[in-house]
Image (cartoon, rainbow, N blue to C red):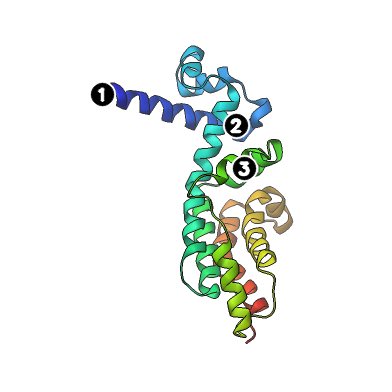
């Protein structure tokens, strides 16, 4: 029972820290505010996390751990590139609609502390594009795809999927859409992005 209580306390801390860090960033967040939001005193917060940096890294790692395995599974499967692009786009957008804070949170930390990604790369669930690159090269040789650099293709896929989330306020203003209409635009992008990329790289 005591162990369960500890886990619940830590979960409240991480949820509170996620909210505060998302709103104010690493530099603007205060440990006292996080403790208050978690419903504990500051001494208890320091018992779990000695300083703000360790807490931020814990929240960031948790956020990334929710997304990374899904990306890795799609990149590592045996489906053709066309199916892989469709799965990647649909799964990514569906996931981020449910966890909208993750893209900005990850970009914020990478800009603030770019070396931290090196720690994440050691995790077995960290995605890599080795198999994706081999598949692209093979489908180019078979004449299924136009000559294209696999790294450039992957960057295009990431950019077209990530940008509508990290630039949401700007794009809502440009398109003059409210929250529900913008959500519908994101839903449509599950197929729009995939179709756009696939039509640009396929030979027929």
Residue 125: % across, % down: 48, 50
Residue 35: % across, % down: 51, 19
Spatial separation of the CA atoms under disc 2 and disc 1 = 30 Å
Residue 179: % across, % down: 59, 51
How packed is label 1: few (under 14 Cα within 10 Å), some, or many (20 or more)?
Answer: few
Pick the quarter of the image with the C terminus.
bottom right
Q: Which SS class for mark 2?
A: helix
Disc 1 to disc 3: CB gap under 8 Å: no
Q: Residue at x 46, y 70 (%)?
A: 78
Which residue is identified by label 1? 1
Q: Nearer the viewer, residue 149 or 41?
A: 149
Q: Nearer the viewer, residue 108 or 181?
A: 108
Which residue is identified by label 3? 117
Q: Residue at x 53, y 29 (%)?
A: 17
Which residue is identified by label 2? 21
Q: Which SS class for mark 3?
A: helix
How packed is label 2: few (under 14 Cα within 10 Å), some, or many (20 or more)?
Answer: many
Q: Residue at x 46, y 21 (%)?
A: 48
The mark that comes first in sequence, 2 or 1, is: 1
Rendered view: 120 above or below 47? below
Q: Is residue 94 in view?
A: no
State how many labels appear.
Answer: 3
The mark that comes first in sequence, 1 or 3, is: 1
């Amino acid at each position: 029972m005591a162990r369960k209580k500890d886990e619940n306390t830590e979960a409240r801390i991480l949820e509170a820290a996620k909210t505060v860090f998302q709103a104010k960033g690493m530099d603007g967040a205060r440990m006292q505010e996080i403790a208050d939001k978690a419903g504990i005193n500051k001494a208890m917060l320091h018992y779990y996390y000695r300083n703000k940096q360790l807490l931020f890294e814990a929240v960031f790692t948790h956020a990334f751990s929710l997304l990374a395995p899904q990306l890795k599974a799609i990149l590592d499967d045996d489906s053709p590139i066309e199916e892989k692009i469709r799965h990647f786009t649909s799964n990514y957008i569906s996931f981020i609609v449910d966890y909208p804070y993750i893209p900005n949170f990850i970009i914020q930390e990478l800009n603030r502390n770019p070396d931290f990604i090196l720690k994440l790369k050691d995790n077995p669930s960290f995605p890599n594009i080795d198999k994706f690159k081999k598949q692209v090269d093979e489908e180019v040789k078979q004449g299924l795809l136009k000559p294209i650099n696999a790294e450039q293709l992957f960057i295009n896929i990431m950019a077209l999927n990530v940008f509508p989330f990290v630039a949401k306020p700007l794009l809502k203003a440009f398109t003059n859409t409210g929250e529900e209409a913008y959500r519908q635009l994101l839903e449509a992008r599950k197929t729009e992005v995939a179709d756009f990329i696939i039509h640009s790289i396929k030979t027929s």
